[in-house]
Image (cartoon, grey):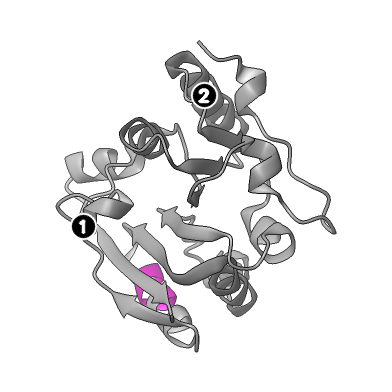
Amino acid sequence: MSSINDIVCPPPPIDELFSPEKVFHESGPFELEIGCGKGGFLLRRARENPELRLLGIEWANKYYMFAADRMARWGMTNVRIMRADARQFVIHNLPPECLSVLHVYHPDPWPKTRHHKRRLFQTPFIDAAARALVHGGRLAIQTDHAEYFDWIKNKVSGSEELIPTEYNEPDAGIIESSAQTNFEIKYRREGKRIFSVAFTRKC
């Protein structure tokens, strides 16, 4: 069993670039999941792909602690969990061309019009995400909110660096068009429709 202190990862200062090499102490493809919740997707991804370095960001403290404890109990040495503002982390802390995959599953839709400015998928975030992906890297998105899904597609389609690609990609953790996150499992049981889309950075 790993220690939870081996799993939790404090966010860097706003003017400091995040170093996967320092955090994981080994090389390998680096993936980030924004809004990892209880860590169901990350755990499956880490167990099936020990060569990957996986970082999960979660703002809700109870889920952040749950996910970190879960990874520690399973001994997942290739996973780190961070409590941080994901928008600020991607924009200010991710180095260029460091991510092979960026997973964003069920981000907060902020459904009220006056709150749309709080949505994650705004132009500065999308530009920073594209910059952080390696050429050919993947951005995978899933939501249960139809209006936000249209918003996301419209915003991301405005990027000159990102082009649509097939969402169903087993090598990226998507099996039969499902990421199998805790939220997705819950929403499918409730009969909600799930919307998904993926993009790759131009080579």
Q: Are marks 1 and 2 in contact (CB under 8 Å)?
A: no
Q: Position of residue 129 (x, y in %)?
A: 56, 68
Q: Is residue 169 above or below residue 60?
A: below
Apparent side of residue 191 relative to residue 117 in the rendered image (left or right): left
Q: Quadrant of the C terminus?
A: bottom left
Magenta residues, dominant SS class: helix
Q: Position of residue 144 (x, y in %)?
A: 31, 57
* Element assignment for label 1: loop
Q: Is residue 47 above or below residue 115?
A: above
Give residue 138's quadrant in the image: bottom left
Q: Position of residue 164 (x, y in %)?
A: 32, 79
Q: Residues within 10 Å of mark 1 (few under 14, many from 20)?
A: few
- The residue that label 1 is drawn on is 193
Give residue 86's quadrant in the image: bottom right
The range drawn in magenta is 148-152
**Residue drawn at 31 percent across, 68 percent down:** 197
Q: Residues within 10 Å of mark 2 (few under 14, many from 20)?
A: some
Q: Is residue 34 above or below residue 132?
A: above
Question: Can you name the residue that lies furthest to the front here?
Answer: 27
**Mark 1 → mark 2, Cα distance in angstroms:** 27 Å
Identified by mark 2, the residue type is Phe
Q: Nearer the viewer, mark 1 or mark 2?
A: 2
**Residue drawn at 32 percent across, 53 percent down:** 172
Q: Position of residue 112 (x, y in %)?
A: 51, 66
**Residue drawn at 49 percent across, 55 percent down:** 108
Q: Is residue 70 above or below residue 20?
A: above
Sooner in the amino-acid sequence: mark 1 or mark 2: 2
Residue 107 shown in magenta: no
- The residue that label 2 is drawn on is 66
